[in-house]
Image: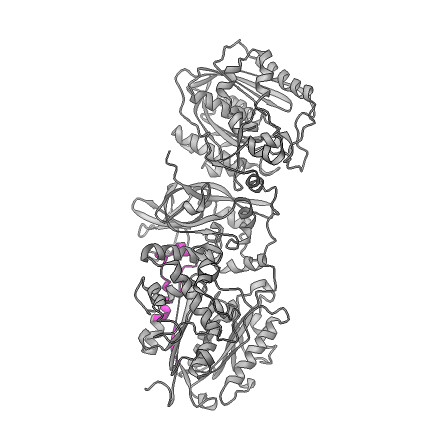
Amino acid sequence: MTGISAIGTYTPRFRITAEEFSDAWGQFQASGVNQKAVAAADEDALTMAYEAATRTLEVGDVDPESIDWLGFGTSRPPVAEEDLTARLGAMIALESETSRHVFTSSTRAGTRALWAGMDAVQAGAERALIVAADAPRGEPDDAIDHAAGAGAAAFVLECDGPARIVDRAEYARAFPGTRFRESGSETIDELGVTQYDRRAFTETIGGAIDGLKETWSPSAAAIQAPDGKLPYRSSGPVGVETDDIRAATTVHDLGDLGAASVPISVAKALENGYETILAVSHGSGAGADAFVIENPSGVPTTLDLGGETPLSYAAYLRQRGVVTSGPPSGGGAYVSVPAWQRSIPQRYRREAGRCPECGSLEFPPEGACRSCNFLGEYDPVQLPREGTIEAVTTISQGGAPPEFAEQQAQSGDYAAAIVAFEVSGERVCLPAMGTDADPSTLEVGDRVETTIRRIYTQEGVTRYGFKIRPLETA
Amino acid sequence: MSDAYLVGAGQSDYGAFPEESYRSLFRTAFESALESVPKGLEKSAIDEAFVGTLGVGGRQLGLSGPAVTEHVGLEGVPCTRVENACAASGFSVRSAVQAVKSGMADVVLASGFEVMSDMSSDATKYWLGVSGETEWERLSGTTFSGVYAQMASVHMERYGTTREQLSRVAVKNHSNGAKNPHAQLGFECSLEDAMEAPVVADPLNLYHCCPTSDGAACALIVSEDVVSEYTDEPIRVAGVGAGSDSVGLFEREEYTRVPASERAADAAYQTAGVGPDDLDFAEVHDCFAIAELLAYEDLGFCERGEAGSLVEAGTTELGGELPVNTSGGLKSKGHPIGATGAGQVVEAYKQLTGTAGERQVEGATRGLTHNVGGSGGAAVVHIFEKEGESGVQA
């Protein structure tokens, strides 16, 4: 038997309402979506995966080194080719030997990762981490983009996890052209043959449910939700109640979460204590996965589905880079990719150094000790996520290095701070960019926490690293 | 050990000059320096040259020293390019003084140049940040306006320094620069202008930031043995000091002082045997308004935390007890990075030879120049003293 032993979700802070689209376009094409989550300019599937995974490991009190299998599912990896589980694993401090797998090309990718994780646990893996993160994109004037949300969920799987996965089945039949993204294209297409699309959806979902070994009576159903109507319309024929779907749905408030749609709905159902949960994903092509989860005693869960910052439609276009022109061409102040790679322990995990002679902290952990002038190897020390602002400014247009001009055009002025971190009475300072907050709200003396975001992209290679945001008071 | 003397100094105009090259600007400064020598100086007398430049734009990144000295006909003279960011030519003056004091040279050219206006503003900014700590500080989203704004945020928090006091630095320096024909922004500005300009990096607005500039400056440093060939009223390089520090602000113990400046000033005062009270004027590195206030404290013009009050009281304006940046400073005169330190010496020379025109400090006999690289990774201070009948009494 395989069970979920911890689960967590992440959604970006931005929300845009259907009314904003209606005001801009005269219509809103995503049925049943009242508002949706929008990723910030410095977020993508990888950073959202990091956020969800970090929360899940925290709520489950799981040591990352104990994870021996990682599965990452997204329909929209930030690069078309490159194994992002290497970076994700470095961000959450997995061992280099951890088995890693990417699942993509479909909104079913999140449940494919779950499926493979179950196989791994059944084959002897001790603890699997499944992360599904997505932020679909269409053209600004189509229904896919109007529905497209953003979010991530992560699960820890173990053979004796309390939320047991008691049944599963999958189903596929060829339905070309229902939802697809051509090679090199940034945006998803669909032909929009309504009855054909609907049939692909209902037949694969029904097929997966029919394939289950038993007939279940779920109290909640987490069904793939490309919009707010399809899951209800399509699932009547397969014996799922509308109320059961409503119990787990997130599409009305978060939009189409792609490969994270079903995983986030499962998290919501577990958080709400439903005992028998049916989870059915769908991916174009077409195929579906069905799972039945029994949750008699509850499972450690951290759910963050609220977003407090409303976006106007113009700000939405800016955040998504639709109306900005890209970074200016380069000149001085170049940081090479190999130089960046060497600093990954610092950029992802805030690894400082402790002086073996005098015990003071140094960042970056290289060069002569500023306290005692020792010149040698430092003992690595991971700084805590929380620190205190010691100096801060808000960088306005014109004050930013040109590498950040595109980001500033997308997301506006930002804070740049010097932040002090403490480990057993020793203090060390790091410079950090602010995110996830109005920069003017960050002041000297404020407590902040780090996260990982996109820093910038040069030569086609996105550099990720720590940023700071106000400490969540929740 | 020979004493070193300043016998001539000159500069090009500072500004944006699409019709000029870095070489033609350098030639203007060089010829102006030669012409300023009271008893004349033939370029063939020059034994050695130091040229400060950061290399903005990369147009002649290697061998940028000989590229200008050969252009002006200093044939075959040993020439070294000096790079210490915005303090490049302050350090070229230091190198010239060292060459003279060591006895290896009698007549040395100390100089600098920079061209910053012949690129797009984005390309310029790529180059501006290059003297900041690149791997961490810059990647937190800062160029120098951001780093100095962080310093200002802490100074304001700790000492109650106000935005108005920052703006008063701009008002004072523009008032001086309006009297300097070489100044790039040679116009007066009102306190209101300087308070309400667009924000660049809070709390710093556009009037709290120096411009980007093209320009060149040259100074001639000679030994005790030959000084009488060039002038009857020698100006001695009485104080020499320099220091360095972490390149990144975040690597320093405190954010409201520039230890490299403190070290440079301590050494300069000590070698000159004088203190801040003995100065008649000072040219300090005001790349941002907060930098001038920090300089007041680092150079001992006032106690820690009192720089805002000092500028507010008018002590540092022309006619005040200690006029600072009579040239207009980096703010109004301009800041062609590699030329700035040598350009400060040009102002010191003018003040001490009584040729500063409308901005002349009456009876000036001793002045200080203070040139900072980056946010304080390097700093250099010189104290110049006028000798002879109208100079300081031994």
Residue placed farthest to the top in the image?
Answer: A215
Nearer-the-camera pick, A331 or A28: A28
Nearer-the-camera pick, A369 or A451: A451
Q: x, y (%) of residue A175?
A: 68, 21
Q: For residue B176, say whether it is visible.
A: yes
Nearer-the-camera pick, A75 or A202: A202
Q: Which residues are magenta?
A: B237-265
Report the coloring of the rendering. one colour
Q: x, y (%) of residue A186?
A: 64, 37
Quarter of image, res B321: bottom left
Q: Is residue A388 above or below residue B300?
A: above
* Residue B247 covered by magenta stretch: yes
- Residue drawn at the location 54% of the way across and 22% of the way down: A115
Q: x, y (%) of residue A350?
A: 42, 44
Quarter of the figure with the C terminus of chain A: top left
Quarter of image, res B381: bottom left
Q: Is residue B252 above or below residue B319?
A: above
Number of callouts: 0
Q: For residue A167, say whether it is visible.
A: no
Nearer-the-camera pick, B172 or B136: B172
* Residue A111 covered by magenta stretch: no
Q: Is residue A229 above or below residue B332?
A: above
Q: x, y (%) of residue B102?
A: 42, 80
Quarter of image, res B58: bottom right
- Residue drawn at the location 41% of the way across and 83% of the way down: B235
